[in-house]
């Protein structure tokens, strides 16, 4: 059997085990939706990292940089990272004091139940597109390293995510995110030297890259 298939099988099995185990920590809706407000700094940081630096960032953003340079990603991840930092410093403490369960709860608290429902409906297409990008990245990973059809890869990856999320809620999502963060950091730091060597070294990469690729602010012609 293909070693990559074995590794992927073990990985997805671990994700499912974490989901089943996390289900034992679920006692009420608060546990399921926001992990009982007991994540702590390490797990909260891990889940934010893994959420923002997933398939779309690692694969999609890399492709955007290749085509457009750093200016192509000024909004995400650079802008998104800055927004997260500012939100954490100035908004998160106030939101926590409101004792909310979901993002749209704030609309009901200050306005009406109808506005909360409307906000939820408007958010659905955005999150479908965002989550879809992660599932597509999973399918592409399967296709790249195995002979599995990308559509089958998306079905397997998406199915595993749905199962462990339903079983363990936010606890499962957070713990699997922690594992995924470690794998992502280890993987990138491991392959980086090989990629740079194959490209002729960091100096060769910089010297052979057009200067406009390092521009991160809009130029007059872009305004």
Image (spheres, helix red, strand yellow):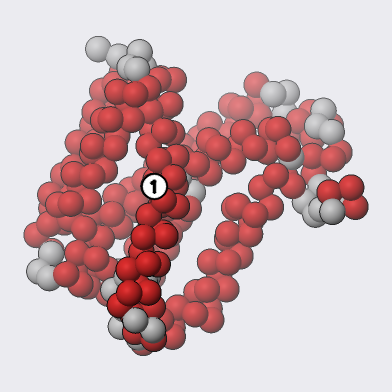
The residue sitting at 19% across, 36% down in the picture is 13
Indicate the position of residue 208 as horizontal and vertical percent values: 82, 28
Side of 196 relative to 142 (left or right): right
Quarter of the figure that contains the N terminus: top left
The residue sitting at 34% across, 24% down in the picture is 151
SS state under label 1: helix
Identify whether 125 is placed above or below 105: above
Give the labeled residue for mark 1. 128
Indicate the position of residue 147 as horizontal and vertical percent values: 35, 13
Viewer-proximal residue, 115 or 192?
A: 115
Quarter of the figure that contains the C terminus: bottom right
Viewer-proximal residue, 204 or 217?
A: 217
Side of 44 relative to 164 (left or right): right
Side of 29 relative to 104 (left or right): left
Indicate the position of residue 124 as horizontal and vertical percent values: 37, 55
Indicate the position of residue 46 as horizontal and vertical percent values: 40, 58
Res. 74 visible in picture: yes
Identify whether 207 is placed above or below 29: above
Q: How many marks?
A: 1
Q: Within 10 angstroms of label 1, few (less than 14), some, or many (20 or more) residues?
A: few
Viewer-proximal residue, 180 or 82?
A: 82
The residue sitting at 27% across, 68% down in the picture is 34
């Amino acid at each position: 059997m293909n070693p990559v298939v074995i590794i992927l099988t073990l990985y997805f099995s671990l994700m499912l085990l974490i989901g089943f185990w996390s289900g034992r920590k679920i006692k009420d809706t608060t546990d399921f939706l926001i992990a009982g407000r007991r994540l702590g700094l390490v797990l909260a940081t891990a889940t934010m990292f893994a959420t923002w630096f997933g398939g779309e960032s690692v694969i999609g953003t890399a492709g955007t940089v290749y085509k457009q340079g750093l200016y192509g990603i000024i909004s995400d991840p650079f802008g998104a990272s800055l927004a997260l930092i500012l939100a954490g410093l100035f908004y998160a403490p106030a939101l926590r004091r409101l004792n909310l369960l979901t993002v749209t709860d704030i609309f009901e608290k200050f306005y009406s139940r109808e506005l909360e429902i409307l906000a939820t409906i408007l958010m659905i297409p955005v999150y479908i597109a965002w989550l879809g990008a992660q599932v597509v990245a999973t399918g592409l990973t399967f296709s790249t390293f195995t002979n599995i059809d990308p559509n089958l890869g998306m079905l397997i990856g998406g199915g595993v995510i749905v199962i462990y999320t339903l079983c363990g809620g936010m606890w499962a999502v957070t713990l699997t995110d922690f594992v995924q963060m470690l794998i992502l950091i280890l993987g990138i730091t491991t392959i980086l030297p090989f990629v740079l060597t194959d490209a002729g070294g960091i100096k060769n990469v910089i010297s052979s890259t057009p200067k406009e690729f390092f521009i991160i602010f809009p130029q007059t012609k872009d305004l």
